[in-house]
Image (cartoon, helix red, strand yellow):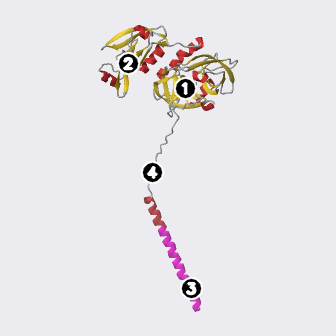
Amino acid sequence: MTRLALTLSLVSIVLLAATIYQVASIQSDLANLKAKIPSAMTPATTVTVTTTVTKPVPVVMGGVSASYSELYDAVKMSVVMIRVSSPVGSAVGSGFVYDETGHIVTNNHVVQGATSIRVVFLDGGIYEARLIGADVDSDIAVLKIDHGERKLIPIRLGDSHSLRIGDVVAAVGNPFGLEGTLTIGVVSQKDRVLPTSRGFSIPGVIQTDAAINPGNSGGPLINMQGEVVGITTAIEPAGVGIGYAVPSSIIKRVVPALIEKGFYQRSWLGVTGLSMDEEISKALGVEVRRGVMIAEVVRGSPADQAGLRGATRTTTLDGRRIPVGGDIITAINGSAIGSIDEFLLYMEEYTSPGQQVVITLYRDGGYVNVTATLGVRP
C-alpha cells in the first residue's frame, strides 16, 4: 500500500467515527428533551368571557312588549301634517286622527287665521279641512276632513294623570316639514303652567326632553301603550331639550265640546293670587304653609259675590312685593290646594260653569268655608 492510500484510509476511519459520535449525541439530546416536555407543560387555563348585550328599552302595546319601530308603525298613519295658508304666508304643523268620522286634533296656534287648511297623510293622501272649533286658552283646535272611502285610524287617548317622571314618551310629527318624524324622550316633569296669548295659563302641562321643533306643534305625545297623553305645543325658547305638551286630561274635556259646539267654556272664580310657601308664612307669622294668597278679587265676579277678600297691603320679602291681608285658599271641595298651579289645574279639570264649590279659606287666624257659584271665564 502506498503512503497516499494509507493516508486516505486513515482519514475515512476518522470521519466515520466522528459521524457515529454525532448521531449518538443527537439521539441522546432528543431523549432528554422528550423527558423534559411533560414537566414543562402548564395545564390549560379555562377563561370565561361574559358578553353583555345591550337591548333597546322595550315598549308595551296591549300588554305585549314591542320595539320603538312597532310603536311607530302602529301610529304613523294616524299622525298628519297640517299645511296652512294665511294672509301672512304658509306654515306647517302636525295633528292626529281623533275619530273615524274625520275629526283631526291640532293646536289652535297652528291654524289660527288660516284661509286654507290641508291635511296630509304619510302615504301622500291630501284632504281639504275646515275648522270646527278652537280654544285659545288650551291651544287646542279641531278640524274636519271629508275622507271619502279612506279608513281613518284614531289614536286612543291615554291617562296623563298616570304618567310618572322618567316614563318614556314619543313625539310624532313633522318638525321643519320633515314628515313622519319620531323622537323619543322621557317625562321630565308634570304640572307645568304655560301662558297663553290671552293672558291666562294652561295648567298641568307635561315637560319632556323628546325633541320638539317648529312643525311638531299639534302632534301627539304618545306613551308606550301607543296612547296620546298630550299635544306637543311649545318649546322653551332659552332652553335645549325642553318641550311642553298639553295633557290628555284637558284634551278629553275640550275636544268633545269643540266638536259639539265649536267652543269651550271653562269655569271662572275671579281672583288673582300667588303661591304660599314656608318663607312667606314665617315672614307673616301665620300657620299656613301652603295655599293660594288672594291678591285681588275681580269686582262683580263669583269670588266677589261669595265674599272672598283680596290683599289690603303689600310687603317686601327678599326684594319681592308680596300682597298680604287677604284670604288664603287652602282647599276646594275638600281637595287640598297648595299652590297657584294646583288651583288652576283643579279649576280646569274638575269644575264647570254654574257649579257650586266650597272653598276653604284661612282668614283672620282661623279657617272658614265659603260657597261660590262659578261663572264663565270671560
Q: Sequence order check: which comes first, mark 2 or mark 4?
A: 4
Residue at x 50% of width, y 69% of height = 27
Q: Which mark is residue 9?
A: 3
Question: What segment carries the magenta color?
Answer: 1-29
Q: Do the residues labelled 3 and 2 touch (CB within 8 Å)?
A: no
Type of residue at label 4? Thr
Q: Do the residues labelled 4 and 1 touch (CB within 8 Å)?
A: no
Q: Sequence order check: which comes first, mark 2 or mark 1?
A: 1
Q: Which mark is residue 293?
A: 2
Q: Sequence order check: which comes first, mark 3 or mark 4?
A: 3
Distance Cα–Cα, label 3 vs label 4: 60 Å
Query: Which is more foreground, mark 2 or mark 1?
Result: 2
Distance Cα–Cα, label 4 vs label 1: 59 Å
Type of residue at label 3? Ser
Circle 4 residue: 45
Query: Which is more foreground, mark 3 or mark 2?
Result: 2
Q: Which of 36 and 264 is in front in this view?
A: 264
Distance Cα–Cα, label 2 vs label 4: 75 Å
